[in-house]
């Protein structure tokens, strides 16, 4: 749907401001230094950042699949890269054919970048997952080939928090049921067991990017907010952390779940926890389907312990749109559909135009930083390494990037190769078997660059050498 005319869409430059972190708790995901300059294509006023030249930018070939948002496309084209854009994913044979030629591939959730596919990608430097998850990529295999992978884990936090606010009011006023009745032609004006949310207590389980956003919105609506998290986290506004999940369940009128899917969060809400909830309270789950034992929820609703529930996520979710929300997929589906005051949505918590735009900007800017500067901040499969940018005052400098197997003695050999040069700064980090080294070398001639490159390439630990200058 086109945006309504009276809603002003932010320009690319303005949109950048929310590209890295939507949470008021910036500690979760802070923008790297110099972040703005790469994304806007403008200048960082604090220092004139030198654009490094790994190659002629038009030599960089990028394949974007699955209708990646135009914010990301525009940013990559703006860098002068060759960008091929397709609206769909590709069958495996066509994907293999195309991936042979490109340096960068951008995908969403439908394109599976398996070891078989990546084996053919001889020029591939980096993968951009323009989505939240990275399950579709063989991350381990990619790391072993020196291919960095970036995604955008938090760009839709605000969208989820807003959906939950809508659901809290809808459950309190039984809006879903009234609307369904009217669609069937039934006028049913009732006020019994319909409530304002002002003055009620919201219990947030998991006070991360989404939980903390929700906290701000709920307080603005006049709710009291308590939260439970395994980490001790600073409260936003007047919210209050409680020591246990049980303490939260005993006090909350509305319980909203915002934890990740881990072994510890599987069936976090089961029969025992429902018994701790206040009689006539409400449950919202827009986190992951495994967090709630839905059979136990159905029972808790039948006895009135839970007066309403909103579910956006399920243990088994269909791969495509269609008539799939039936017992074949999840054994309790029909029981759940038969209950009153239950809002069921098909995992749309983060599905907004704004979130898609923010994802486009965040992933494209990570790709640009990686291609032009070599920094791996935000990478999900390589160690996160960031180094101060070179400035226009740095003449005859080169940035050496050496991705290698993490075996004893490598640094001694690399430093031996760089020993006759002036190394201004150097950083190295490892993640499992893979290590990433960056060094800025000054007073360097073109013939030295070639020699350094050939010597690094000859080391047995080498996965990939790049030199930016
Ligand atoms: N419905 C959607 O469309 C949608 C969209 C985005 C994210 N999500 C899901 O929402 C959830 C939260 O996302 P986020 O970005 O806020 O994550 P986050 O990592 O920022 O925050 C998660 C919080 O949960 C806490 N936590 C972890 N285990 C816990 C436990 N056992 N008990 C209590 N707290 C625990 C962590 O300490 C952290 O503070 C994730 O499961 C994510 O997959 C859903």
Image (tube, rainbow, N blue to C red):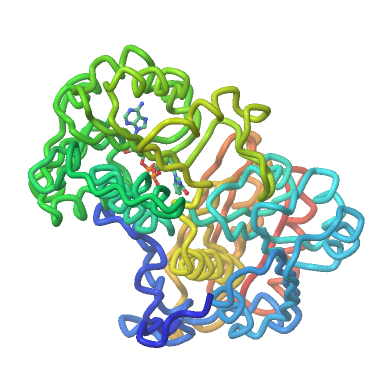
What residue lies at 22% left-to-right and 19% top-to-bottom?
Answer: 246
Viewport quadrant of the C terminus? bottom right
Residue 189, given in percent of the width and then of the height, sits at 24, 49
What residue lies at 32% left-to-right and 48% top-to-bottom?
Answer: 167
Number of numbered discs: 0
Residue 304, given in percent of the width and then of the height, sits at 28, 22
Taking the image as shown, residue 20 lies to the left or right of residue 249, namely: right
Residue 231, given in percent of the width and then of the height, sits at 27, 32
What residue lies at 43% left-to-right and 57% top-to-bottom?
Answer: 156
Height in image: 336 above or below 140?
A: above
Front residue of this view, candidates 290 and 342: 342
Taking the image as shown, residue 101 lies to the left or right of residue 466, namely: right
Q: Residue furthest top?
A: 272
Q: Tell me which corner region of the image, top left, top right, bottom left or bottom right, holds residue 79.
A: bottom right
Height in image: 449 above or below 433?
A: below
Height in image: 178 above or below 449?
A: above
């Amino acid at each position: 749907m086109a945006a309504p005319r009276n809603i002003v869409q932010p320009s690319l430059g303005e949109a950048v401001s929310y590209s890295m972190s939507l949470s008021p708790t910036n500690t979760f995901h802070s923008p790297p230094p110099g972040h703005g300059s790469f994304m806007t294509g403008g200048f960082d006023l604090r220092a004139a950042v030198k654009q490094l030249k790994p190659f002629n930018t038009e030599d960089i070939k990028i394949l974007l699949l699955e209708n990646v948002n135009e914010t990301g496309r525009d940013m990559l084209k703006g860098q002068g890269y060759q960008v091929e854009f397709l609206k769909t994913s590709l069958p495996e044979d066509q994907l293999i054919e195309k991936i042979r030629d490109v340096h960068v591939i951008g995908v969403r959730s439908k394109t599976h970048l398996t070891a078989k596919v990546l084996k053919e990608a001889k020029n591939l430097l980096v993968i951009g997952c323009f989505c939240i998850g990275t399950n579709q990529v063989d991350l381990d295999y990619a790391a072993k080939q020196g291919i960095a992978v970036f995604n955008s884990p938090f760009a839709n936090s605000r969208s989820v928090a807003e959906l939950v606010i809508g659901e809290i009011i809808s459950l309190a006023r039984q809006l879903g049921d009234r609307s369904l009745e009217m669609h069937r032609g039934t006028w049913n004006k009732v006020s019994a067991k319909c409530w304002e949310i002002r003055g009620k207590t919201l219990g947030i389980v998991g006070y991360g990017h989404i939980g903390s956003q929700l906290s701000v919105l709920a307080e603005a609506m006049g709710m009291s907010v308590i939260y439970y998290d395994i980490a001790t986290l600073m409260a936003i506004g007047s919210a209050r952390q409680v020591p246990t999940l049980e303490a939260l369940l005993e006090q909350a009128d509305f319980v909203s779940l915002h934890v990740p899917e881990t072994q510890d969060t599987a069936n976090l809400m089961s029969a025992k926890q429902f018994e701790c909830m206040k009689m006539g309270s409400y449950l919202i789950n827009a986190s992951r389907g495994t967090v709630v034992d839905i059979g136990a929820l159905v029972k808790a609703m039948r006895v009135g312990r839970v007066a309403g529930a909103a579910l956006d996520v399920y243990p088994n979710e269909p791969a495509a749109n269609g008539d799939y929300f039936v017992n074949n997929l999840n054994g309790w589906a029909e029981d759940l559909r038969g209950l009153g005051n239950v809002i069921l949505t098909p995992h749309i918590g983060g599905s907004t135009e704004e979130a898609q735009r923010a994802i486009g900007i965040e992933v494209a800017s990570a790709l640009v930083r990686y291609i032009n500067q070599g920094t791996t901040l935000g990478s999900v499969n390589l160690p996160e390494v960031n180094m101060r940018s070179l400035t226009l005052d740095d003449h005859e400098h080169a940035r050496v990037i050496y991705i290698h197997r993490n075996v004893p003695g490598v640094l001694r050999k690399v430093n031996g190769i760089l020993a006759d040069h002036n190394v201004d700064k150097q950083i190295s980090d490892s993640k499992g078997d893979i290590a990433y080294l960056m060094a800025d070398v000054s007073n360097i001639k073109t013939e030295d660059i070639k020699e350094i490159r050939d010597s690094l390439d000859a080391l047995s630990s080498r996965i990939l050498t790049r030199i930016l200058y």
